[in-house]
Image: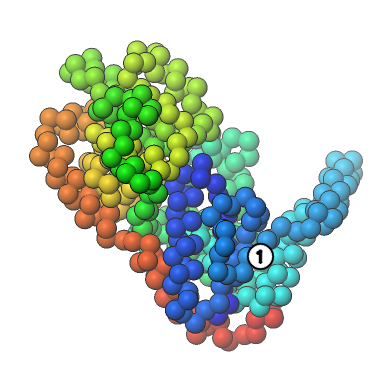
Amino acid sequence: MKIAVLISCLSEEIGGGYTFESQLLEEIIKVSAYLSHELILFIPNPQKSDYLINLPIQVVSTHRSVIERIYSYLAFRFKFIVHKLFNTTYTFEYKNGLKRHINNLIRHYKIDIILSLSPIAFTQIDCPYITPIWDLAHRIYPYFPEVSSNGQWEERENYYTHVIKRATFIITGTEAGKAEIEKFYQIPPERIKVIPLFTPKLQSKTNSINQDITQKYCIPKQYLFYPAQFWSHKNHVSILLAMQMLKNDYGLNLSLVLVGSDKGNADYVKSMVQKLELSGYVYFLGFVPQEDMQPLYCQAFALIYMTFFGPDNLPPLEAMSLGCPVIASNVSGAREQLGDAALIVDQRNAQAIANAIKLLFDDPILRNNLIERGLVRANQWKVEDYAGELFKLIDDFKTVRRCWDRMIL
C-alpha cells in the first residue's frame, strides 16, 4: 500500500515527543525497505525539522502556497466581519481550504492510508488514518491551566472528538489508555490498539556518559533529577514540599536538578523554592541538549517523576535504561507501564513522596534492585517492536482497503 507518514515537525526543545517521533521515523524508513509498502512523508514544514536531511523517501509539504493562504485569510476576515455585523453564519475558510489541499495531495499521490507518528491528524479528510493518543488529560484534569485556559479545553475536545471518532485505528500504550478512549469517546474496542511505548535511545557524544556533568552545570554530586517542562501538571511543587519535609524532619538535604523549558509556570516554582527556603538545593538548568541528558540520568541518585498526566510517560523508561532508579506518580497506566521496576506513589501526597525518597536513601539494596528491574523493564519494548506492530496493523487493514478505489474521495 501507499502510506503517507505524517509527522509534526517537532523541535528538540519539545523533549520526549521529539525523541519518540524522530526515532520511530528512522526505524519505519529502515524496515520499510524490506516490506511491500511505499512511504511518502507528509510534513507541515520540512525546513523546521533537523532530522529530515537526506531521507531515502519522498517528502511532501502539507503547507498550501502563499497565495492560497493569503486568499483564505482575507476570506476568513471578511466572513468574520459579516458575522459580527449581521450575526450570520460563517465558516472557517482557511480550514476548508486546507481540507481541499490535503485531499488533493492524497488523491495526487494515490495514498491508501495515513500513519501519524505523534498525536496529530488531519480532521475532515476522506482517507483512512492511524493516529496515536498519548493522553486525554483535558477530560480527567480539566482544571489545569494548560488544558483549560484561553479556549484550550474546547480546542482539545473539538480536535479529539473529530480525530478519534473517524480514525481507522487509534494507538495507545496501555490498557488504561484504551479504557479512557472507550469511556470518553465511545469507540469500539477493536479500533483501539495497545502498543506499549518503546524506550528511546538517548543521543550522546563520545564518552559523554563518563563526563563530569556536575562540573559542566555546577550541580552537586548527588541529586534527584526531574526532566519536565514547566507546566503546572508536572507538579514540581509537591516535590519541593517533600524536600522541605526531608530537610526539616530528617536532616536530609538532598538536591534537586530540574531541566526543561518554561511553559508559564517556572516563575511560580522558583517563588516556591524561595518560600520553602530551598534556594541552595534546587538547580534550574533550563533546556539542555540531548547529549547531556544521558550523563544527567546516569549520575542522578534517582528520577523523581511526579506528573499528574498519564497513562504513558517516556522519562521513567529513559531513566531505567540508564540505570537510574525511578520514583513515579500513581497516574493511570503507571503500574502497567512500569511494573515493579519503580516506586509508585501518590503524586498529591508530599509526605508519601518524601517517604519514598528516604526509603531509597536508607536502603541501598532496594535501590540496586530497582536499577536491575528497571534495566529489564526498559528492554522489553524497543523501537523495532513498536514499528513492527504498526506494520502488522497496516498489513491486516490491507484486506479491507482493497475493497474500494483509492481515487474515491
| Image quadrant where one finds the C terminus | bottom right
Q: Residue at x 49, y 62 (%)?
A: 25
Q: Secondary structure at mark 1?
A: strand
Q: Nearer the viewer, residue 204 or 67?
A: 204
Q: x, y percentage for residue 178? A: 40, 59
Task: Looking at this view, name the residue that lies furthest to the front.
Answer: 206
Q: x, y percentage for residue 149? A: 59, 35
Q: x, y percentage for residue 367? A: 16, 39
Q: x, y percentage for residue 196? A: 35, 60
Q: Nearer the viewer, residue 376 or 275?
A: 376
Instruction: Examine the rendered structure and indicate whether residue 210 appears above or below residue 392.
Output: above
Query: Tag 1: residue type?
Result: Val
- In this rendering, the count of numbered labels is 1
Res. 293 visible in picture:
yes
Q: Residues within 10 Å of mark 1 (few under 14, many from 20)?
A: some
| Residue that badge 1 annotates | 60
Q: Residue at x 53, y 33 (%)?
A: 263
Asked which quadrant contains residue 43, the reply is: bottom right
* Left or right for 224, reference 369: right
* Left or right for 212, reference 271: left
Instruction: Examine the rendered structure and indicate whether residue 91 appears above or below residue 39.
Output: above
